[in-house]
Image (spheres, grey):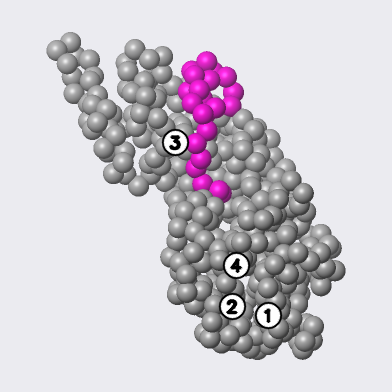
Amino acid sequence: MIITVLDSKKLQESSWFLGKITLWDYLSSVSKEKFDFDVQRGIVKNKYLDNILQSIQRQEPIPPITITSHTFELKESNIVINDNSFNILDGLQRTYRLWLYKQISIIAHETSREDLFGHSVYSISDILSRLKESDYYIPGVLSVSFIKNLLDNKSTVNVSTIQELYKGFDIYLYIWCGLEEKDIIKKMLILNAGQRKVSIGHQYELMFLKIYKDYNLFDKVKLVREKDECYGKTKNGDRKVGNFIFSTTIIGIQSLIAGKPMRLSSDNLELDSEDDYISEEEVNQYFNQPFINLYLESLYKFDDKLCKYDKQYLKWFVKDTTISGIMGAVGYYLRASTGIFNMDSFSGTIVKLLKELEKKDYFQLNKFYLEYNNLSSTRINIGDKVRDAIFRYTLSVLQGNIIKWAEAFNTNKRFYE
């Protein structure tokens, strides 16, 4: 990809460029793999992008797209970037839409036939079939009526005019070269450029993504990211034993280390703040392959044993309120009872809980929901109340004096404060 450089800055550890390239040349350098970039949240439906073709047809500038690359070459007033060496940091939704229109136009020309007057005729069913068979089409992003309009030769912008339109339209790129992964993630967290804000859950994924993807994880656990197709079902409990939400497992580790139930909150998303809940020392101590695998194996064993008692645990033991409450209690118990928190003490405590669980279902889900259903959202924060109740109840199990769920829910005392 050859980009005309309009401006540039040489920074301490990286370089920044402002460049210009035709939309056609940019999209010709984009492959379907660009839409699987780890730090991106995935493609989402956005009705406001339905008019982007009209904006391009009117030669109205669209917001710059930000890309990142580790390798580049400067040639006179151009920067040359290998198609395989860059990723889209901001502008993924715009890029996918425009790229998909280009793919539709290619399919349309490959499957078209001429009528008696020499006009191209397209089969919407053939094109939809080809799209659905492809591995780059995401259902729901484009409506059938929109695709039909794109195939209509009477439309202002259609498959016959897209190539000419794209070749005559310039886009602007912000190009970051030489960024480390932590810096890429920081920029992803702050870049918005008019698109939907990144959710807190996805921000947690970004913060700890490298920690997970570099490890060989415990093979019975599947971590589901917000961008994954099965995310909604998994979050609602329509899942297999061992399938957990990525960000929820992170909250569980934070709760374990802090010794209290944590929650998804924008308050602790600052990456380099001295007030971070997880320090660099703790990251080094606990975010390593042996400890993470022990932690994930523990989650799996809990999940497996609970679901043998009642399949309703598939919905309960996937929630961040549940996992943060249980793991917060484990962390608190370890410090309060032994003063030691390491792999051996953690493993021993989990074994203790699992042995008790083999004897009976001490969480008694039916009794938990009796108390849960009595909560009123108008007077309290239900999420915080549930975390505290599960924390207190789990702690009573560890201490060998199991209380009733009614007592766990009705106390205002917080051991960890």
Nearer the observer: mark 1 or 3; the answer is 1
Q: Nearer the viewer, residue 173 or 137?
A: 137
Q: Is residue 30 above or below residue 406?
A: above
Quarter assignment of residue 248:
bottom right
The residue pinned by badge 3 equals: 141
Give the spatial CA distance, label 1 vs label 3: 51 Å
Which secondary structure lies at badge 4?
A: helix
Residue 56 is a magenta residue: yes
Crowd rating for badge 3 (residues with CA inside 10 Å; few <14, some 14–19, many 20+): some
The residue pinned by badge 2 equals: 362
- The answer to which of marks 2 and 3 sits earlier in the sequence is 3
Q: Which residues are magenta?
A: 40-62
Give the spatial CA distance, label 2 vs label 1: 8 Å
Give the spatial CA distance, label 4 vs label 2: 10 Å
Badge 2 vs badge 1, beta-carbon distance below 8 Å = yes
Picture residue at 52% right of the left edge, 15% below the top? 58
Left or right: where does residue 352 sit relative to residue 29?
A: right
Residue 367: assigned label: 4
Q: Is residue 91 visible?
A: yes
Q: Is residue 320 visible?
A: no
